Image (cartoon, rainbow, N blue to C red):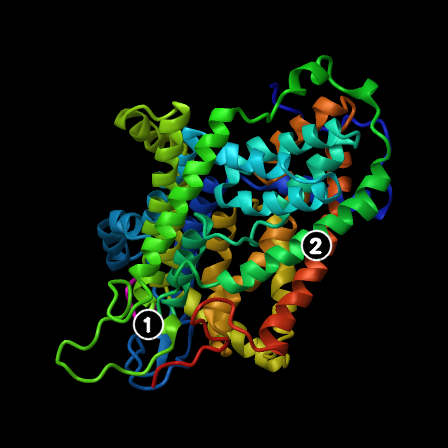
Amino acid sequence: MPEPSLTPVDDRPSGGFIGRFLNFVEWLGNLLPHPVTLFAILCGVILVASGIADWAGLEVLDPRPIGTKGRSEDGIIRAVGLLDGEGLRRIGTGLVHNFTSFAPLGTVLVALLGVGVAERSGLLGAGIRKMVLSAPPNLLTTVVVFSAVISNTASEMGYVVLIPLSAVVFHSVGRNPLVGLAAAFAGVSGGYSANLLIGTVDPLLSGITNEAARMIDPAFAPGGSMEILPTANYYFMAISTVMITVIGTLVTTKIVEPKLGKYDSSRAEEGIEESTKDMGVLSANENRGLRWAGITILGLVIGLALLSLPEGAPFRVPPPKDGSPAPDMTLAQSLKPLLQSVVPLIFVFFMIPAIVYGRIVGTMRNDRDVIDGMAKAMSSMGLYLVLVFFAAQFVAFFNWSNLGTITAVLGADQLVAWDLTGPEVFFFFILICCFVNLMLGSASAQWGVTAPIFVPMLMTIGYSPQVIQAAYRIGDSTTNIITPMMSYFGLILAFAMRYDKKLGIGTLISMMIPYSICFLIGWIILFYSWVFLFDLPVGPGTPLYYVPPT
């Protein structure tokens, strides 16, 4: 499939305010360098800024209580220059450690090993196809959006398999294939932070949040008493799945489908009908493999329950070794070892059913096939490893220089001066994340840049990093589908152009804008209702407010 041009080829004008705004976003986004280059530049900026701040004597009062671990002895936080002899020695000796100890690195790689086996065996693709193709016609749109949300657990599968498959399925029932493509794209990418499953992005984001929160409180270190787990936003993600499915269905049927109208097959790529008419049909062997994979997953769930729920089970907090009475704790608190094991569990729950499925359909004949699946998944992470190297240095330099903490304190003081310390602060924070996401499409890159600033800042005025992360994920998800900076945007454009040779980037963005606006409004309402109106936790054992240790 040829790589599509990002130059609009649609002959229909896209003028007006929205058209000019989208042209501005595209122009502004094209000015940004590659995310790796951006982090490298930011590292240089931090080094220079730290030297200037140190020379200028920049300092603030330390807001942390006396006796808090990490608090300066005299109660003053001073900027630390990193371009003097001591700073250069620290950089030279810490460069490798910064990379290898960066929290998201290991968690993402371990989880991806299992996902790689599931992808190599064909289990992920077959499961998605089964879900979509089995949908009743009157529920087709709902099932497509819901399946797309679930598929973003392994995002590549959603983009590569589900989106083109949804176009084929809609076309086969006499509906516009571009409508199916839009509905699936909205669920996979616009609903990126809604899911019923924990995926690879959850440990990635929680790791970055931990790194940022440690600027305020060292207890957020891995294994520490305040460590943010990959399940930190699970409750909010689960309820968001329902919201995204409902809104996605309504936008598709009430706005996008009427706007696109009846499909004109004369605009399609030559041979598209023949090349896609049999796509997605499951063989008897694949159906058999899915049944046994499902039985395997059920067995794993039962085994995990037996290892977690009974008193004294391995995945519960053990009783004190000195024989003293166990402290009173909720079920979520007693299951902390289980929650801390989410990444290995992702590995197991993807790999074992995938091996069972692969043995039945013939894609996993021996251990070499399993290893090949893991190796292929790792080989796809080359760019991520390069990105993490520079992101880890940026976070470390920001931390060492104290510029992150100073920025947080000054920003918090300004929010207090503006009287923006209440829940309304999250409205502006979400909008900022939306805007940044238009120009920096990578979730890890965007959170790596913004977390060291906003997590300490909002923690300083009393909000927990788990809630801050949940708010960030709204902004990160809702504008994914309208920015050319999103890594899969070109691929989606190429899929769409198979059904409309004259379709351009402006047409694709205009198709997706209704989803983006409605998702944003619905998600903000849900966030404020869930967190502030009903005072519900965003995840197991996650508080709304951050209380510094005394």
| x then y, percent, for residue 325 | 21, 84
Q: Residue at x 45, y 63 (%)?
A: 232
| Residue nearer the viewer, 295 or 335 | 295
Q: Residue at x 83, y 28 (%)?
A: 263
Give the image quarter of residue 27. Answer: top right
Q: Which of marks 1 and 2 is nearer the N terminus?
A: 2
Give the image quarter of residue 86. Answer: bottom left
Q: What residue type is labelled 1?
A: Ser
Decide: is 107 above or below 52. Answer: above
Q: Distance from label 1 to label 2 (Cα)?
A: 35 Å
Q: Mark 1 points at which residue?
A: 334
Q: How crowded is mark 1: few (under 14 residues within 10 Å), some or many (20 or more)?
A: some
Q: Name the residue under label 2.
A: 246
Local secondary structure at mark 1: helix
Q: Are marks 1 and 2 in contact (CB under 8 Å)?
A: no
Local secondary structure at mark 2: helix
| x then y, percent, for residue 363 | 39, 24
Please give the range of residues in magenta. 220-224
Q: Which residue is drawn at 23% across and 54% down?
A: 89
> Is residue 265 highlighted in magenta?
no
Q: Is residue 295 left or right of residue 370?
A: right
